[in-house]
Amino acid sequence: MRYAPTDASMRPHKGLFIMTLNLNVRGAILVAAAITGLVTLASPARADRCDDSAKELANQVDRLKVNFRAANVVYLTHPAAKELSVGCRGDKYSIELYAKGDRKPSPEFFALVGSMAAIVFTVTKDDTTTGATRCLKRMGLLRGDKISMRYRRLNMECTRTKTDASIAITRGKDE
């Protein structure tokens, strides 16, 4: 007669490695799911970068007000400009600042565009004011009514009509 162990600890451990492996994979999946759930619950709901930029502009620039939002563009108002907007996520840019003023822009318009661009693109106010002034003042009889230039890693495009002058400042997606 052969001895047959009755206790489970005395039986041969066939498949113990496979069972342990299955438990470890299941445990790893459960831990990964729990961590993913906690991360999504812990991260606060964030507003769009355009909304953040528009609110920051309204708080830091005098007499600037957020008008409304349409698609990826936030429209702003200020007495020194005819049109103002901050746009996000275009084909070739990550954020765009657009300003339109009189054909001969006033120093107040230059200061407004410079301070807004400094806040939106996190560049010094002197650099953005200098770039905007150069772009807007280059338009004329010799160079034409449309100027594109690059200044301090910002793309500036200035256009002029019979009554208006406008500037669009963008930063590329890869910068």
Image (cartoon, rainbow, N blue to C red):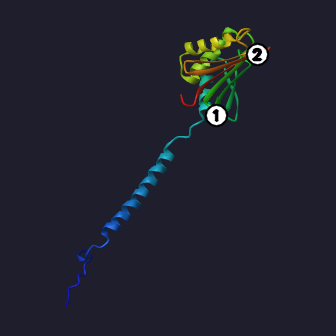
Q: Secondary structure at mark 1?
A: loop
Q: Residue furthest front?
A: 142
Categorize mark 2 by other alpha carbons within 10 Å: few (<14), some (14-19), many (20+).
Answer: some
Query: Disc 1 residue type?
Result: Asp
Query: Disc 2 residue type?
Result: Asp
**Which residue shows up at 59% across the image and 36% down it?**
47
Residue 95: name its quadrant. Answer: top right
Residue 27: name its quadrant. Answer: bottom left
Q: Is residue 36 left or right of residue 46?
A: left
Residue 160: name its quadrant. Answer: top right
**Which quadrant is the N terminus positioned in?**
bottom left
The relative height of residue 31 versus residue 20 in the rendered view (above or below) is above
The relative height of residue 16 versus residue 100 in the rendered view (above or below) is below
- Tell me whether circle 1 and circle 2 mark residues in contact (CB < 8 Å): no
Q: Which mark sits nearer the N-terminus, 1 or 2?
A: 1
Distance of label 1 from label 2 (alpha carbons)? 26 Å
Location of residue 73 in the rendering, given as x and y in whole percent from the top left corner? 68, 31
Query: Label 2 belongs to which residue?
Result: 164
Query: Label 1 belongs to which residue?
Result: 91
